[in-house]
C-alpha cells in the first residue's frame, strides 16, 4: 500500500507546480466570461446583425443579467435588451445508429444604437 500512496503524492506535487513561462497549462487562452460559451455564427444571426442584435450560446444556468454583464465586459459595448431561449436537441440518424444533438441555451443581445462587435460582423 505504501507504493500507491507514494505515487499519488508525487502526482499531486506535479499538479501543484505552476506551468513554465511561455507555456500554457493546457487551458485555452480565450478570455470569455463564464456566462458566455461562444458566439453563434449562422445565416440568421448574420441577418440580425443589421438590426444590431448578436446571438451567443450561453451556459444553461445563466440568466439575462449575467449575460448582459458578460457581453458588456467582454466586448466593451452597451446592452439594451437580452432575449433567451432553450434550444432542444434534434434527433439524427447516423447510418444504423440514431442519436440526439445536445440541448443548449441561446441568448440574443440587442446593443445600443451605434455600438457593434467588430469580430462578429466580419465573419457573417
Image: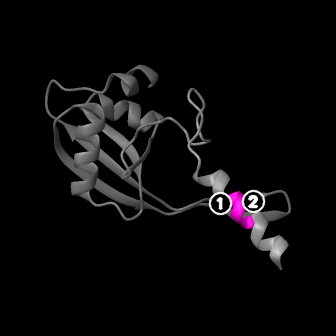
Q: Is residue 92 left or right of residue 87?
A: right
What residue is disc 1 on?
A: 12
Q: Quadrant of the N terminus?
A: bottom right
Residue drawn at x 33%, y 60% is 62
- Label 1, residues with CA under 10 Å away: few <14, some 14-19, many ≥20: few
**Percent position (x, y) of residue 116?**
25, 26
122 magenta-colored: no
Q: Is residue 41 left or right of residue 12?
A: left
Q: From this viewpoint, is residue 92 visible?
A: no
Count of numbered marks: 2
Dot label at residue 113: none
Q: From this view, report whether residue 62 is shown above or below residue 80.
A: below
Q: From this viewpoint, is residue 123 visible?
A: yes
What residue is disc 2 on?
A: 93
Q: Which residues are magenta?
A: 8-12
- Measured Cα–Cα span from mark 1 to mark 2: 44 Å
The label nearer to you, 1 versus 2, is: 1
Of the pair 33 and 53, the residue shown nearer to us: 33
> Hey, which quadrant is residue 53 in on the image?
top left
Of the pair 24 and 13, the residue shown nearer to us: 13
Amino acid at each position: 500500500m505504501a507504493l500507491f500512496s507514494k505515487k499519488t503524492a508525487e502526482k499531486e506535487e506535479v499538479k501543484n507546480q505552476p506551468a513554465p513561462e511561455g507555456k500554457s497549462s493546457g487551458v485555452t487562452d480565450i478570455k470569455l466570461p463564464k456566462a458566455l460559451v461562444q458566439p453563434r455564427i449562422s445565416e440568421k444571426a448574420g441577418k440580425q446583425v443589421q438590426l444590431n442584435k448578436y446571438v451567443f450560446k450561453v451556459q444553461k444556468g445563466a440568466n439575462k443579467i449575467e449575460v448582459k454583464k458578460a457581453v458588456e465586459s467582454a466586448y466593451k459595448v452597451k446592452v439594451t435588451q437580452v432575449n433567451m431561449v432553450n434550444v432542444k436537441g434534434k434527433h439524427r440518424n447516423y447510418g444504423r445508429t440514431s442519436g440526439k444533438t445536445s440541448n443548449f441555451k441561446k441568448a440574443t443581445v440587442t446593443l445600443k444604437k451605434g455600438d457593434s462587435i467588430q469580430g462578429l460582423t466580419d465573419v457573417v
